[in-house]
Image: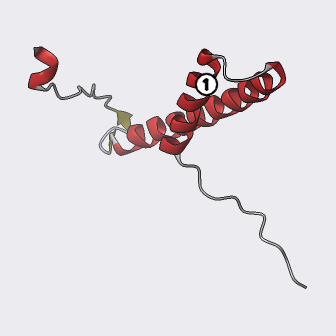
Amino acid sequence: MNKKSNTSPPFNFEKAMEELEGIVLQMESGDFELEESIKQFERGVALTKLCQVALSKAEQKVQQLSLDPENNSVELIDFELPTTDAASE
């Protein structure tokens, strides 16, 4: 029996965010007619949900990696973005 592969390519967070940003820019500039705006809005909502799921999974993975093996508690660590000299000017 010959089975077709129904697997989709792995989700790429960065590409999804780029696509979402493009949709937002086009919608803000009024490039779409009404029907296309609705389709693009639906696509944007779907991308947003996919990105939220990916971020939630990443957060869970960070929590698992931060698990203190001695007492099985999670030590949450605040991450700070590095500052650059250009940002302080």
Tell me which corner region of the image, top left, top right, bottom left or bottom right, holds residue 44.
Answer: top right
In this rendering, position of residue 59 left or right of residue 82: right
Q: Which image quarter holds the N terminus?
A: bottom right
Of residue 64 and residue 69, the one placed in the foreground of this image is 64
Residue 58 rendering spot, x and y as whole percentages: 46, 40
Of residue 72 and residue 18, the one placed in the foreground of this image is 18
Name the residue at 39% across, 40% down: 62
Residue 79 rendering spot, x and y as whole percentages: 26, 28
Of residue 70 and residue 68, the one placed in the foreground of this image is 68
Name the residue at 23% across, 27% down: 81
The local crowd at label 1, few if under 14, some if 14 to 19, many if 20 or more residues have their Cα within 10 Å, is some
Residue 63 rendering spot, x and y as whole percentages: 40, 37
**In the displayed structure, would residue 17 be above or below residue 15?**
above
Name the residue tied to disc 1.
Answer: 26
Name the residue at 78% across, 21% down: 33
Q: Which image quarter holds the C terminus?
A: top left
Q: How is the image coloured?
A: secondary structure
Residue 52 rendering spot, x and y as whole percentages: 57, 31
Tell me which corner region of the image, top left, top right, bottom left or bottom right, holds residue 8.
Answer: bottom right
Could you tell me how many numbered marks the image carries? Answer: 1
Question: Dot 1 lies on which element?
Answer: helix
Q: Residue furthest right?
A: 1
**In the displayed structure, would residue 73 be above or below residue 14?**
above
Three-letter amino acid code at the position of disc 1: Gln
